[in-house]
Every structure is written in structure tokens, then in C-alpha cells.
């Protein structure tokens, strides 16, 4: 079961690795993936990048409201020898919101059930080792407007709570836009109101998971 306010880890960008087993090539691509409706688009791109392959096997693991959503495909390989091993590697990684596609070019020698499982497993593991991971934190979007006299306090004290700054505008007042982790939201707002004697104009927006690039 997932928890909306809990941090989780995923990958920052796609990564690849290639393994060879008895002249069969296994090319694994790991992809950030959080929307099942993008599945066909991802597979079309992989087929375009690696045309004429024998198999395009895949699995994904997506963070849901109450549980992890998962799917996999053997794409013509013997049942349980490709998609499920790929999914197992994703689960064991501790990562979420990602997809793995393994392209196989048949090398002329049958690998057997154990050989296929090993080849698909090792290919995905190798691709994961080439990927950069990041922690995602549940945040609330905010916009605050303060007098210039309070901007120094924001920079010295409050900015440390902000995970991501989107914009700062200096006009008749200072307007600051960014994302605050839910775990710091109440403290952030309390200290802001205390420091400005309630003069700060605060607008809170949507919640979203934001990558913590400082971790």
C-alpha cells in the first residue's frame, strides 16, 4: 500500500545497457513512467530505435493511490521467462514510477527457460546500475507576497524549508513562488505569519511529487 505523503525514489532519466547471451543481444532501457496511457508511445519509440528485433518485452511499476500498479509482457517469449523477471527486478530495486523494455535480437541458439530468465534479469539490472535515482517528496505549491522588509528573513530562515523555487518577482512587493514539502508546510506558514505579523499574502495550490535534487 502506498501513502500519499511518503517520499519515494525513482529514476531521473532513461538509461540503457546491453548484454549478450550465446549471440543473442539483450538491450534494456529503463524509463521514468507514471502514466499507463503512454505505454504504446513508449513501445513505438523503442521499436523505432531498435527495429527488426525478435522480442520487445517489458514491465512497469507505477505508484497508485492505494497500491502499486504493475503490468508486464513476454511478447512471445515462453511464459514467465521475460516480463515477470523484468518486473521482479523493478520491484527489488525499491523504485517506483518506472518502466523497463528489453529488446532481444535472436542469435540463433535457444537459451532455455533458465537462460532466458537470467538474460532478461541481468539486462535490466545492468540498465538500473546506469540510472541516476532521485527521491520524490510530496509538496504543496505556494505563492507568497511580502514587503521588502521581510525578504531578508525569508532568505535567512524560510528558504531552507522550500524544496523548489519557481520564481521571485520584485515589484511594489516581493512575490515568491515555489514548492514546500508537506512535512514542513505548517512550520513554514507559522514562521512566515509570525515574522510578518500576519501581513504576508499566502496562496496555496496543488499538491505534487517534486524531485529532491539536493539529496
Image: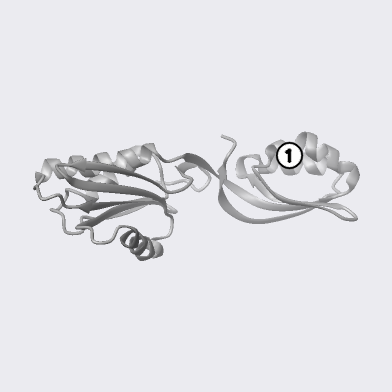
Residue at 79% across, 34% down: 156
Residue at 73% across, 39% down: 159
Viewer-proximal residue, 10 or 55? 55
Residue 119 drawn above or below residue 208: above
The answer to whether residue 91 is visible is: no
Viewer-proximal residue, 189 or 124? 124
**Badge 1 density bin: few <14, some 14–19, many ≥20, Cα 10 Å:** some
Residue at 89% across, 46% down: 148
Q: Residue under label 1, please give it.
A: 159
Q: Position of residue 143 (x, y in %)?
A: 74, 53
* Mark 1: secondary structure: helix
Q: Position of residue 107 (x, y in %)?
A: 15, 49
Describe residue 31's horizontal placement relative to residue 174 as left or right.
left
Viewer-proximal residue, 1 or 122? 122
User: Which quadrant of the rendered structure holds the C terminus?
Assistant: top right
Q: Quadrant of residue 18?
A: top left
The answer to whether residue 202 is visible is: yes
Q: Quadrant of residue 195?
A: top right
Q: Position of residue 51 (x, y in %)?
A: 28, 61
Viewer-proximal residue, 57 or 193? 57
Residue at 75% across, 38% down: 158
Amino acid at each position: 500500500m502506498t501513502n500519499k505523503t511518503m517520499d519515494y525514489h525513482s529514476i531521473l532519466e532513461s538509461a540503457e545497457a546491453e548484454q549478450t547471451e550465446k549471440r543473442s543481444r539483450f538491450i534494456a532501457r529503463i524509463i521514468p513512467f507514471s502514466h499507463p496511457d503512454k505505454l504504446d508511445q513508449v513501445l513505438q519509440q523503442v521499436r523505432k530505435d531498435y527495429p527488426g528485433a525478435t522480442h520487445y518485452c517489458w514491465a512497469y511499476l507505477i505508484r497508485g493511490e492505494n497500491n502499486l500498479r504493475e503490468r508486464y509482457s513476454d511478447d512471445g517469449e515462453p511464459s514467465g521467462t521475460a516480463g515477470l523477471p523484468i518486473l521482479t527486478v523493478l520491484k527489488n530495486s525499491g523504485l517506483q514510477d518506472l518502466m523497463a523494455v528489453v529488446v532481444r535480437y535472436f542469435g540463433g541458439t535457444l537459451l532455455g527457460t533458465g537462460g532466458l530468465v537470467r538474460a532478461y534479469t541481468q539486462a535490466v539490472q545492468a540498465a538500473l546500475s546506469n540510472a541516476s535515482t532521485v527521491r520524490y517528496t510530496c509538496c504543496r505549491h505556494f505563492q507568497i507576497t511580502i514587503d521588502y522588509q521581510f525578504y531578508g528573513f525569508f532568505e535567512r530562515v524560510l528558504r531552507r524549508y522550500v524544496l523548489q523555487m519557481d520564481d521571485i518577482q520584485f515589484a511594489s512587493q516581493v512575490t515568491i513562488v515555489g514548492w514546500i514539502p508537506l512535512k514542513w508546510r505548517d512550520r513554514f506558514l507559522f514562521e512566515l505569519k509570525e515574522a510578518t505579523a500576519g501581513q504576508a499574502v499566502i496562496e496555496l495550490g496543488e499538491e505534487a511529487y517534486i524531485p529532491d535534487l539536493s539529496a
